[in-house]
Image (tube, grey):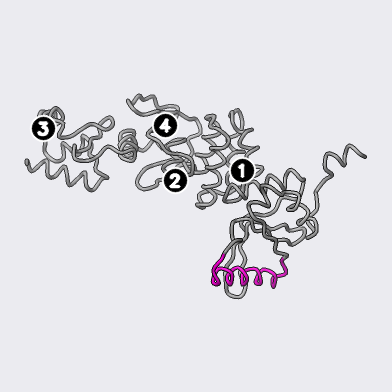
Amino acid sequence: MHTADLQLIDVANAHHQLVTRVDVTACGLSSQQWCDRLDDEVWIRVSEGVFRHRATPLTWELKVRAAAMSLGRDAALYGPTAAQWWGLDGFSGDRVELVVPRIRRSRHPNITLHTTRGWHTADLLTVDDVRTMSATRTIIDLAVSGHQPDAIEKAIDSAIRLRLTSMARLTRRMTDLAPGRPGIRVLREILFDSGGESFLERRFLALVRRERLMRPLTQVNYTANGRAMRVDFEFSDGNVVVEVSGRLGHTTDRERQKDAQRRNSLQQLGKTVLEFTTADVMANPDYVIASLARSGVVATRPSGRDREAV
């Protein structure tokens, strides 16, 4: 094997199995030598100006990296591709979508390319050597581009669970970008019941909103007896803590001991601790609401029935 080929393989190994035309020249291969290698499919084009060795399998990750290398620094992963790169729930596949500033005009085969006027450095992050839209901006872009609400909900839940965004950050950035953008209304509706880390927590928040209860704080941290704890919800008006995240049903002595210690620590802080199962939230919401009411959580305004009777 030619020395230049060995050098090029070393370069590929150092750059996620990809090389550029600049790398080819730097390794000493002439244009004709390089064309011969392409014709013989020793090296194969993945994206414009970016290549892989034929021994390297073509994966979705490789295509994403090649597209990002081809487009350069003024491009970032967009929408579903960014969501998949971040590891958000509900997004997988083989499509490669990137976004560039609106002033740039570019065509690249096998890449879905978007443009945007809202090219802000605050939205741009580098993750595993690839520039991508932030998780916050990605969720907004998913709404703007018309993705289904259930897909957006999964993205929000997993982004919050992974500590990639927060309700406050999402709301603030959405407000900044809202004027004239379709999909923002849908996102606002989804955010009413967001802030938890699971579908069950979202359903609990939807139940609270439906019954016009004060919205609880979500994912609240406490320290008691030398241990850190995070609870699903806290209603500040009644000092009530609610857990719906599956801690019930533990069967081993050690699990039951940890549950009891956790509950005791919260009670020693003066908290009323309520625990609801999936069956409670999904199939017996009246029990949930009645339990909250007995613990001092009250409606912030009359229900529809009450208003009609006045």
Quadrant housing residue 249:
bottom right
Query: Which numbered tag is attached to residue 171?
Result: 1
Measure the C-alpha gap from mark 3 to mark 2.
Answer: 41 Å
Amino acid under disc 2: Gly
Kindly state the secondary structure of the residue where label 2 is placed: loop
* Chain-order first, disc 1 or disc 3: 3
Which comes before the other along the chain, label 2 or label 1? 2
Where residue 195 appears, as percent x and y from the top left, is: 61, 49
Determine which quarter of the picture holds residue 209.
top right
Query: Looking at this view, is 94 or 74 the one in front?
Result: 94
Q: Nearest the camera: 130 or 252?
A: 252
Q: Is residue 7 above or below residue 116?
A: below
In the rendered view, would you say 262 is above or below 10? below
Residue 120, numbered label: none
Q: Which residues are magenta?
A: 251-271
Quadrant where the image shows the C terminus: top right
Relative to 225, 65 lies left or right: left
Q: Amino acid at mark 3?
A: Ser
Question: Is 127 positioned to the left or the right of 1 in the image?
Answer: right
Q: Residues within 10 Å of mark 4 (few under 14, many from 20)?
A: many
Marks 4/2: CA–CA distance = 22 Å
Question: Which amino acid does the dot numbered 4 rest on?
Answer: Val
Report the residue marked by disc 2: 87
Extreme residue toward the bottom, this view:
225
The image position of residue 47, as x and y in percent, is 28, 31
Label count reads 4
The answer to if 18 sits in the magenta stretch is no
Q: How far, Cα to Cα, is label 4 from label 3?
A: 32 Å
